[in-house]
Image (spheres, rainbow, N blue to C red):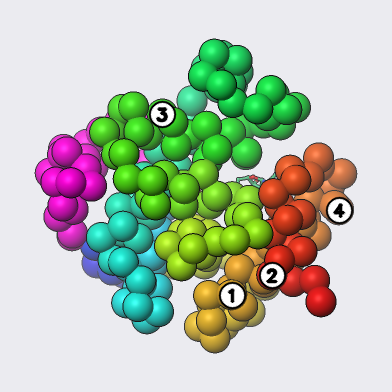
Amino acid sequence: MNERGFTVANVNYRQELVPFDRKTLLERIKAQLSDGRFQHVLRVEQTALDLAERYGGDKQRAGLAGLVHDYAKQRPDEEYKALIRTEGFDPELLAYNNGIWHGVVGAFIIERELGIHDEQILNAVRQHTIGSDNMTKLDKIIFVADFIEPGRDFPGIEAARQAAATSLDAGVAFEIKQTLNYLLSTNKKIYPKTIATYNAYVAK
Ligand code: DGI
Ligand code: FE
Ligand code: FE
């Protein structure tokens, strides 16, 4: 439990998945993030473990992906733009911002700096903000855990948690609909995969 009464995971991840013990891994993540963001990733780790338990997912990959999913969130825009230009990313990404970059490009940074090469984990990080039209169970667990972790408080959070308790697909559908509504109401540019996720999990 932490100071707000949330359960905090204490999992050692397999050496084949990440080359650091838990203490070192947490230190490296903490050094990248504000305290609030660090607490968020700990809660996403625990929530992802809970969802993996409930839905028969891979707990090692779910917990670890939850822990690292926002590792690169606080990098400067200039670093992202340079990586997009030099590392073979779709130049269309330059038309977006940190909201999209920290997952899609963040996975590259995580692989390089944390030595995580597992494609299932990296894909879950890439998709954690936007989803896709063919999400794996792990992708869904991370997408949903990020949205419903116990520190989240916004109108609709209880309905989001109920949807996630019904099924992972219901959780994904609820979340992408709410996100898309928000993006539309604030005139944000919609990333194509965000629409693909809506079409795959919401549209009838
Ligand atoms: O990193 P977190 O704050 O934990 O959560 P997140 O990764 O789900 O969301 C990051 C931001 O990305 C959030 O403010 C919403 C935004 N976002 C999600 N889909 C799109 C988007 N922004 C744009 N412009 N277009 C999208 O399709
Ligand atoms: Fe994120
Ligand atoms: Fe997050």
Between discs 3 and 2, the one toward the N terminus: 3
Position above or below: 32 against 60: above
Does the magenta segment cover residue 33?
A: yes
Q: Which residue is mark 2?
A: 201
Q: Is residue 66 magenta?
A: no
- Answer with mark 1 or mark 3, whichever residue precedes in sequence: 3
**Residue 176 seen in the current view:** yes
Q: In 3D space, how far apart are the residues under numbered discs 2 and 1 (Cα atoms)?
A: 7 Å
> Can you tell which mark lies on residue 169?
1
Three-letter code, disc 3:
Ile
Residue position marked by numbered label 4 in the rendering: 185
Side (left or right) of 35 relative to 99: left
Residue drawn at point x = 21 percent, y = 43 percent: 18
Q: CA distance from mark 3 to mark 2?
A: 29 Å
Neighbour tally class for label 2: few under 14, some 14-19, many 20 plus, Cα within 10 Å? many
Give the mark nearer the N terminus: 4 vs 2. Answer: 4
Which secondary structure lies at badge 3?
A: helix
Name the residue that disc number 3 marks. 109
